[in-house]
Image (spheres, rainbow, N blue to C red):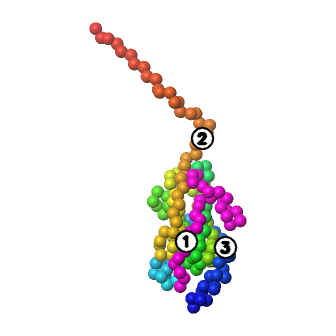
Amino acid sequence: MKAKFLVLLLGVANATFCAHAEENNAPLPASDAVTPADATKLNVPAAGQVTRAIFTSDIKNHEPTDDIATLSNDKTHIAYFTEIQGMAGQTVTHRWEYNGKLMFEMPFQVGASRWRVYSTKTLNPAWTGEWKASVVDAAGGSLSVNTFSYTKKIDVNAPAASTLAPTTSATSSKQP
Protein backbone atom coordinates (compact mmCIF):
# COMPACT_ATOMS: atom_id res chain seq x y z
CA MET A 1 0.00 0.00 0.00
CA LYS A 2 2.81 2.43 0.86
CA ALA A 3 4.55 1.74 -2.45
CA LYS A 4 1.39 2.58 -4.41
CA PHE A 5 0.97 5.82 -2.46
CA LEU A 6 4.60 6.78 -3.04
CA VAL A 7 4.26 6.17 -6.78
CA LEU A 8 1.14 8.33 -6.84
CA LEU A 9 3.00 11.14 -5.06
CA LEU A 10 5.99 10.88 -7.38
CA GLY A 11 3.66 10.97 -10.35
CA VAL A 12 2.36 14.41 -9.34
CA ALA A 13 5.51 15.79 -7.75
CA ASN A 14 6.29 18.05 -10.70
CA ALA A 15 2.74 19.24 -11.22
CA THR A 16 1.88 22.81 -10.34
CA PHE A 17 -1.58 23.68 -9.18
CA CYS A 18 -3.23 26.71 -7.70
CA ALA A 19 -6.36 27.05 -5.65
CA HIS A 20 -8.07 30.31 -4.77
CA ALA A 21 -10.65 31.45 -2.31
CA GLU A 22 -12.22 34.81 -1.70
CA GLU A 23 -13.64 35.96 1.55
CA ASN A 24 -17.32 35.78 2.07
CA ASN A 25 -19.04 36.89 5.22
CA ALA A 26 -21.09 33.72 5.67
CA PRO A 27 -19.91 31.27 8.32
CA LEU A 28 -18.15 28.18 7.05
CA PRO A 29 -20.36 25.09 6.88
CA ALA A 30 -19.67 22.55 9.59
CA SER A 31 -19.03 19.87 6.96
CA ASP A 32 -15.88 21.74 5.81
CA ALA A 33 -14.34 21.67 9.28
CA VAL A 34 -11.57 19.16 9.92
CA THR A 35 -11.17 18.25 13.55
CA PRO A 36 -7.90 17.07 15.11
CA ALA A 37 -9.49 13.61 15.38
CA ASP A 38 -10.17 13.62 11.63
CA ALA A 39 -6.56 14.63 10.95
CA THR A 40 -5.26 11.50 12.65
CA LYS A 41 -7.47 9.37 10.35
CA LEU A 42 -5.85 10.78 7.20
CA ASN A 43 -3.67 8.17 5.55
CA VAL A 44 -0.99 10.64 4.40
CA PRO A 45 2.33 11.64 5.88
CA ALA A 46 2.22 14.68 8.13
CA ALA A 47 5.55 15.93 6.80
CA GLY A 48 5.33 18.98 4.61
CA GLN A 49 6.06 22.65 4.70
CA VAL A 50 5.14 26.09 3.51
CA THR A 51 7.94 27.15 1.15
CA ARG A 52 6.57 30.64 0.41
CA ALA A 53 4.00 32.79 2.16
CA ILE A 54 3.48 36.46 1.30
CA PHE A 55 0.88 39.19 1.11
CA THR A 56 0.32 40.57 -2.38
CA SER A 57 -1.94 42.98 -4.21
CA ASP A 58 -2.69 40.52 -7.02
CA ILE A 59 -2.02 37.07 -8.48
CA LYS A 60 -1.06 36.64 -12.14
CA ASN A 61 -0.31 33.25 -13.74
CA HIS A 62 -0.55 31.58 -10.31
CA GLU A 63 2.16 33.85 -8.86
CA PRO A 64 2.06 36.93 -6.59
CA THR A 65 2.71 40.23 -8.37
CA ASP A 66 4.41 41.93 -5.40
CA ASP A 67 5.30 41.47 -1.72
CA ILE A 68 3.40 43.74 0.69
CA ALA A 69 4.64 44.54 4.18
CA THR A 70 2.66 47.78 4.57
CA LEU A 71 -0.63 48.73 2.93
CA SER A 72 -2.31 52.14 3.21
CA ASN A 73 -6.01 52.23 3.93
CA ASP A 74 -6.89 53.84 0.61
CA LYS A 75 -6.47 50.28 -0.70
CA THR A 76 -8.93 47.70 0.59
CA HIS A 77 -7.97 44.46 -1.19
CA ILE A 78 -5.10 42.12 -0.27
CA ALA A 79 -4.26 38.48 -0.97
CA TYR A 80 -2.31 35.92 1.06
CA PHE A 81 -0.36 33.59 -1.21
CA THR A 82 1.23 30.34 -0.02
CA GLU A 83 3.17 27.58 -1.68
CA ILE A 84 2.95 24.25 0.12
CA GLN A 85 5.10 21.18 -0.51
CA GLY A 86 4.76 17.59 0.63
CA MET A 87 1.17 17.80 1.93
CA ALA A 88 -0.90 16.30 -0.91
CA GLY A 89 -4.28 15.07 0.31
CA GLN A 90 -4.21 17.15 3.48
CA THR A 91 -6.21 20.21 4.44
CA VAL A 92 -4.62 23.54 5.29
CA THR A 93 -6.41 26.69 6.37
CA HIS A 94 -5.63 30.37 5.86
CA ARG A 95 -6.50 32.11 9.13
CA TRP A 96 -6.73 35.94 9.06
CA GLU A 97 -6.55 37.86 12.35
CA TYR A 98 -6.78 41.54 13.28
CA ASN A 99 -5.96 42.77 16.79
CA GLY A 100 -6.08 39.18 18.04
CA LYS A 101 -9.58 38.62 16.65
CA LEU A 102 -10.27 35.94 14.06
CA MET A 103 -11.66 37.72 11.00
CA PHE A 104 -11.73 35.01 8.32
CA GLU A 105 -10.77 31.38 7.75
CA MET A 106 -10.56 29.49 4.47
CA PRO A 107 -9.72 25.76 4.33
CA PHE A 108 -8.05 24.29 1.23
CA GLN A 109 -7.57 20.70 0.17
CA VAL A 110 -3.96 20.29 -1.00
CA GLY A 111 -4.14 18.48 -4.33
CA ALA A 112 -0.50 17.75 -5.20
CA SER A 113 2.99 17.60 -3.78
CA ARG A 114 3.55 21.23 -4.83
CA TRP A 115 0.43 23.33 -4.32
CA ARG A 116 0.01 27.09 -4.60
CA VAL A 117 -3.03 28.64 -2.97
CA TYR A 118 -4.25 32.08 -2.00
CA SER A 119 -7.11 33.73 -0.22
CA THR A 120 -8.20 37.35 -0.48
CA LYS A 121 -9.53 39.76 2.10
CA THR A 122 -11.45 43.00 1.68
CA LEU A 123 -10.39 45.41 4.40
CA ASN A 124 -12.43 48.15 6.03
CA PRO A 125 -10.33 51.36 5.96
CA ALA A 126 -11.01 51.80 9.69
CA TRP A 127 -9.21 48.50 10.48
CA THR A 128 -5.73 50.00 10.64
CA GLY A 129 -3.06 48.22 12.62
CA GLU A 130 -1.28 44.90 12.40
CA TRP A 131 -2.87 42.01 10.51
CA LYS A 132 -1.73 38.42 10.77
CA ALA A 133 -2.36 35.49 8.44
CA SER A 134 -1.40 31.93 9.31
CA VAL A 135 -1.29 28.65 7.45
CA VAL A 136 -2.71 26.03 9.80
CA ASP A 137 -2.70 22.26 9.29
CA ALA A 138 -5.70 19.98 9.92
CA ALA A 139 -4.56 19.28 13.47
CA GLY A 140 -4.44 23.03 14.27
CA GLY A 141 -0.65 23.39 14.08
CA SER A 142 0.79 26.59 12.64
CA LEU A 143 2.92 26.04 9.52
CA SER A 144 3.58 29.71 8.72
CA VAL A 145 2.71 33.12 10.18
CA ASN A 146 2.99 36.43 8.35
CA THR A 147 2.03 39.99 9.26
CA PHE A 148 1.46 43.26 7.46
CA SER A 149 0.70 46.78 8.69
CA TYR A 150 -2.49 48.46 7.51
CA THR A 151 -1.82 52.15 7.90
CA LYS A 152 -3.73 55.38 7.55
CA LYS A 153 -2.99 57.01 4.21
CA ILE A 154 -0.83 60.08 4.56
CA ASP A 155 -2.37 63.03 2.77
CA VAL A 156 0.48 64.73 0.92
CA ASN A 157 -1.71 67.80 0.33
CA ALA A 158 -2.36 68.38 4.02
CA PRO A 159 -0.55 71.34 5.54
CA ALA A 160 2.64 70.30 7.25
CA ALA A 161 2.87 70.70 10.98
CA SER A 162 5.13 73.54 12.01
CA THR A 163 8.54 72.48 13.18
CA LEU A 164 9.02 75.70 15.10
CA ALA A 165 8.32 75.79 18.79
CA PRO A 166 5.11 77.58 19.58
CA THR A 167 5.58 81.15 20.69
CA THR A 168 4.18 82.26 23.98
CA SER A 169 3.86 85.68 25.44
CA ALA A 170 3.27 86.70 28.96
CA THR A 171 2.54 90.05 30.46
CA SER A 172 2.81 91.00 34.00
CA SER A 173 1.69 94.01 35.83
CA LYS A 174 2.88 95.27 39.12
CA GLN A 175 0.30 96.08 41.61
CA PRO A 176 1.17 99.02 43.92
In the orientation shown, which residue stands out farthest toward the top?
176
Q: Nearer the viewer, residue 153 or 5?
A: 5
Residue 150 percent across, percent down from the top left: 55, 52
Q: Amino acid at mark 3?
A: Phe
| Label 2: few (<14), some (14–19) or many (≥20) C-alpha neighbours in 10 Å | few
**Residue that badge 2 annotates:** 155
Q: Is the Cβ of the residue at disc 2 closer than 8 Å to that at disc 1?
A: no
Query: Does 126 lie within the magenta span?
Result: no
Real-space Cα distance between discs 2 and 1? 41 Å
For the point 53% across and 30% down, the residue is 162
First in residue order: circle 2 vs circle 1: 1
**Picture coordinates of residue 120 (x, y %)?**
60, 63
Task: Tell me if label 3 and label 1 are in contact, CB under 8 Å.
Answer: no
Marks 3 and 1, how far apart at CA: 16 Å
The boundaries of the magenta stretch are 43-71
Q: Residue furthest left?
A: 176
Mark 3: secondary structure? strand
Residue 128 x/y as whole percent: 52, 51
User: Marks 3 and 2: which is nearer the front?
Assistant: 3
Residue 49 numbered mark, or none: 1
Q: Find residue 17 and name its label.
A: 3
**Which mark is first along the chain, 2 or 3?**
3
The answer to whether residue 91 is seen in the rendering is: no
> Relative to the observer, which residue lies in front, 141 or 93?
141
Q: Residue at (63%, 84%) from the top-left corner?
A: 8
Type of amino acid under label 1 = Gln
Task: Determine the CA span between mark 3 and mark 2.
Answer: 41 Å
Vertical side of 40 occupied by 131: above or below = above
Give above or below for 25 relative to 2: above
